[in-house]
């Protein structure tokens, strides 16, 4: 447990001693990992980043299958990591347990909600870490902390033993510092033997790049060129006829409403403490009517139909993972809100399409990591992970 | 500090050792009192019932004048008492510091937001206690805990050195177990020599009694009769042409919006933790537009004009303080919400009129205290306190 006890980044849950020794043999033998505190570990309470949630839960009866599978594959789970409360956050600030430090960008957030997992990996405290991605919770911290990180296809991997947020968006994901190790974990997670792979076509999403800071677009040019040369067929296209703000709104409405449904009974029963911004968004979500949900679902269907024509097998969409590198920690909420909205304007694509998306840590701006993303057709997870590995050779 | 250290009711702030020895001589010599943790005590941080608020404040430079005056009059301030967070509550439940016990109704709330002050007085831990009343925060706990408790005329007594909530509604008040002691404190607070007084006319507010449970109306009949006989002229009237729900809505909108203005900069800067219901109401208040405020102010003016014709000098309005005795502690928020709305349907009168109102602990229902209120013309504070004392002889 040395890694957990020596935690200069505040990445781990201090109130948990969960630890699972890896099997002595297996493809991940000798590696260490951490799990976001939304994964059940038998005998331990799953805290979910909120002390009142934690206080209302019994210890988990079973260990989440993904954790168990990694342990069986030889990796040692050294601890639980901090999450934004009830996974409702994109920046990685937790008012109850503290904000994990971004080892690659001191003084700035690590991104969330899988903040502690990203912090622990980026700081070298573990070899890899499990997270979850509902609206960007793996992709954003991967971009901010300079990590490989993936949102898997919605429904591809089981969510058993994981604290849910919004069922039509929740996915599992993981972080690693290099593509080779990322791929080894992918092998175990997908239960396949990942091959190096290369897409047949890349679409550079012009309107997604317009969401990002100009300086970010600039530092991503060289990686885009390198990757494009590797793929060969490169097109530039606009994906959203009316702009991504509309997509963001659909994603936020549907995700928020589902997140509210997930917690509403507990909220009513326990009147839990939340940071103001979390409570405010839940309160807003409680006002979203069934009529609005129906209208938003229809819009989501239309977006999916529209994208099905563009995103054909073998195609990947290239976009900035985040519009900017990690913002400073502790900014006023009004400034964080603005940043949050811009981030989700990019991350909403994955959720809207139920698509896999991988962050490649291929750029820096003034020494701060900022990631390039590839999004593929739902089910093309191995193409993305295999491509990341191929690129890194 | 014995009283504070022996606190079986959880009424006092455990994280404060504020204590001010009373002057050796004076009208209150030998008495002990407590102050809601919104009154400044020099050298101590005013906590306001929220740990993140407390963490953001320096120690108070000066002691609030009301506290200083009582100490000069001989009373010893033995400690600070728990308040609903940032005084935003009517039930007395505090998610951070616990819910003070109602010594007169075990298992039920003490009422708020001056919960700890009422609990400490009802439990005999102090002789009297200071509170504040913006939307009912002295009257409600007085009713639930079986105490004399008063909301003073808005603007009559200084609010210096007190944590504000909503400036056009905030008032200071106090609790005592008997009318004589209540009057002695009133002497000091008003700086007058309170005489026994009797109103010349009592209006029984029929539509206010309709808001209360039938069983409450029943147990209040005998006190009303006794008081009515004392006054002589008794009328029954309806006060609100369109019902008190409309008055409640005006009060809530204006009070909430002002309360939001009071905390919004701090909320933006610190993203503090709140119980969900408190945050939810702040978030709702943030949506109240200037246009709505203007419309509500016009309605308040109309109510005041309407009541000026009814509430003439010497007249008091008789109403139930609360529609029911103290509710059980720990109910789901949906049930608390319903109770809260009904309580404010009665307490809104004081705020809407800026009028003084006193709770007399003259009834019980199944052993639970429930109070009878008298509301007077703004400025008639001494009439109400003097009448309470006269009645008790």
Image: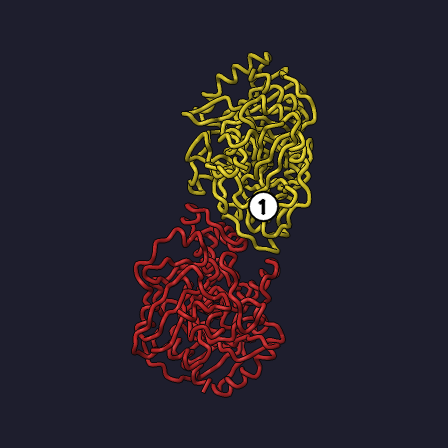
Chain colours: A red, B yellow
Q: Which residue is mark 1?
A: B47
Question: In the rendered image of this protein, does residue B95 appear above or below residue A297?
Answer: above
Q: Residue furthest front?
A: B24
Q: Residue, x 34% and y 78% (percent of image)?
A: A29
Q: Nearer the viewer, residue B287 or B231?
A: B231
Q: Residue, x 61% and y 79% (percent of image)?
A: A218
Q: Chain of mark 1?
A: B
| Residue A297: image location, x then y, percent | 44, 60
Question: In the rendered image of this protein, does residue A309 appear above or below residue A292?
Answer: below
Question: Which type of secondary structure does the marked residue at label 1 adopt?
Answer: loop
Q: In the rendered view, does B174 fall on the left or right side of A72?
A: right
Question: In the rendered image of this protein, does residue B363 appear above or below residue B21?
Answer: above
| Residue B285: image location, x then y, percent | 58, 46
The reply to whether residue B251 is in sight is yes
Q: In the rendered view, does A126 fall on the left or right side of B268?
A: left
Question: In the rendered image of this protein, does residue B56 appear above or below residue B72?
Answer: below
| Residue B282: image location, x then y, percent | 56, 47
Q: Nearer the viewer, residue A245 or A358?
A: A358
User: In what quadrant of the picture does the N terminus of chain A appear?
Assistant: bottom left
């Amino acid at each position: 447990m040395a890694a957990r006890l020596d935690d200069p980044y505040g990445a781990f849950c201090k109130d948990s001693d969960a630890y699972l020794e890896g099997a002595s043999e297996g493809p991940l033998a000798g590696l260490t990992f951490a799990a976001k505190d939304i994964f059940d570990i038998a005998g331990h309470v799953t805290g979910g980043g909120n002390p009142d949630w934690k206080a209302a839960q019994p210890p988990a009866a079973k260990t989440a299958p993904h954790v168990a599978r990694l342990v069986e594959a030889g990796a040692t789970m050294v601890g639980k990591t901090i999450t934004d409360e009830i996974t409702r956050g994109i920046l990685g600030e937790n008012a109850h347990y503290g904000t994990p430090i971004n080892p690659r960008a001191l003084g700035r957030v690590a991104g969330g909600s899988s903040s502690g997992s990203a912090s622990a990996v980026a700081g070298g405290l573990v070899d890899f870490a499990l997270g979850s991605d509902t609206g960007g919770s793996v992709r954003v911290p991967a971009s901010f902390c300079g990590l490989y990180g993936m949102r898997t296809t919605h429904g591809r991997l089981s969510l058993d033993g994981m604290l849910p947020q919004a069922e039509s968006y929740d996915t599992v994901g993981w972080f690693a510092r290099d593509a080779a190790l990322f791929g080894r974990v992918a092998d175990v997670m997908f239960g396949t033997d990942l091959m190096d792979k290369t897409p047949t076509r890349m679409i550079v999403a012009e309107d997604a790049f317009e969401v990002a800071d100009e300086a970010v677009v600039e530092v991503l040019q060289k990686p885009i060129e390198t990757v494009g040369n590797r793929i060969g067929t490169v097109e530039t296209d606009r994906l959203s006829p009316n702009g991504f703000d509309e997509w963001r709104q659909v994603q936020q409405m549907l995700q928020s409403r589902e997140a509210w449904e997930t917690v509403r009974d507990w909220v009513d029963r326990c009147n839990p403490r939340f940071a103001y911004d979390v409570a405010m968004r839940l309160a807003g979500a409680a006002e979203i009517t069934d009529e609005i949900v129906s209208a938003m679902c229809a819009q989501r269907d239309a977006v999916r139909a529209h994208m099905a024509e563009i995103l054909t097998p073998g195609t990947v969409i290239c976009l900035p993972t985040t519009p900017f590198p990690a913002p400073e920690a502790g900014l006023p909420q009004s400034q964080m809100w603005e940043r949050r909205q811009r981030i989700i304007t990019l991350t909403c694509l994955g959720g809207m399409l139920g698509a896999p998306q991988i962050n490649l840590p291929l750029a820096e701006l003034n020494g701060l990591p900022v990631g390039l993303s590839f999004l593929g057709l739902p089910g093309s997870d191995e193409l993305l992970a295999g491509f990341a590995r191929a690129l890194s050779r």
